[in-house]
Image (tube, helix red, strand yellow):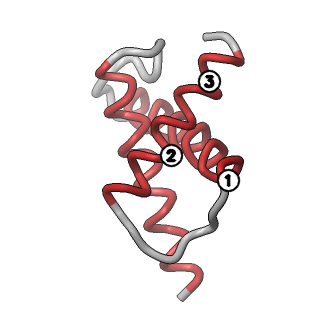
């Protein structure tokens, strides 16, 4: 995937994760994109490690679901650390 696709996927996934799990999180469009990209990477790594799927392979439904789950995991961890 190209960098533009990662940015768009990150924006979509970060927004979805914040919509699914609203709360007091770091804000702003750039943080949302970074959470989405990091969530895509985390979700892709975990799904590959668990043998669930091939990871994030492009802008498709399976990749978005995996990336959203990874982003939700990041938001959950952030909230636990933040206290």
Location of residue 27 in the rendering, given as x and y in whole percent from the top left corner: 63, 63
Q: Earlier in the sequence, mark 2 or mark 3?
A: 3
Query: What residue is drawn where x is 50% and y is 46%?
Result: 14
- As displayed, is residue 27 above or below residue 64? below
Query: What residue is drawn where x is 43% and y is 67%?
Result: 76
Q: Secondary structure at mark 1?
A: helix
In the shown orientation, is residue 81 left or right of residue 13?
A: right
| Marks 1 and 2 close (CB-CB < 8 Å) | yes
Location of residue 74 in the rendering, given as x and y in whole percent from the top left corner: 51, 57
In the shown orientation, is residue 64 left or right of residue 38?
A: left
Location of residue 24 in the rendering, given as x and y in whole percent from the top left corner: 51, 77
| Marks 2 and 3 close (CB-CB < 8 Å) | no
Q: Secondary structure at mark 3?
A: helix
Q: Which quadrant holds the N terminus?
A: top right
Query: Residue 58 bears which disc, if any?
Result: none
Q: Secondary structure at mark 2?
A: helix
- As displayed, is residue 32 above or below residue 6? below
Look at mark 2 in the image and give the residue it sits on: 14
Between 29 and 36, the one lying in front of the other is 29
Residue lying at the far bottom of the rendered structure: 83
Instruction: Give the distance between the C-alpha atoms of the residues marked 1 and 2, in whole angstroms.
Output: 8 Å
| Marks 3 and 1 close (CB-CB < 8 Å) | no
Q: Earlier in the sequence, mark 1 or mark 2?
A: 2
Look at mark 3 in the image and give the residue it sits on: 6
Between 38 and 55, the one lying in front of the other is 38
Look at mark 1 in the image and give the residue it sits on: 31
Number of other residues with Cα within 10 Å of mark 2, as a class: few under 14, some 14 to 19, many 20 or more: many
Location of residue 38 in the rendering, given as x and y in whole percent from the top left corner: 60, 43
Number of other residues with Cα within 10 Å of mark 3, as a class: few under 14, some 14 to 19, many 20 or more: many
């Amino acid at each position: 995937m190209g960098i533009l696709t990662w940015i768009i996927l990150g924006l979509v996934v970060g927004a979805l994760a914040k919509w699914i799990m609203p709360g007091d999180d770091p804000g702003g469009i750039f943080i949302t994109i970074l959470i989405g990209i990091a969530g895509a990477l985390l979700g892709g790594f975990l799904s590959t490690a668990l043998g669930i799927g091939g990871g994030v392979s492009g802008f498709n439904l399976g990749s978005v679901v995996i990336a959203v789950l990874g982003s939700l995991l990041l938001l959950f961890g952030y909230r636990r650390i933040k206290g």
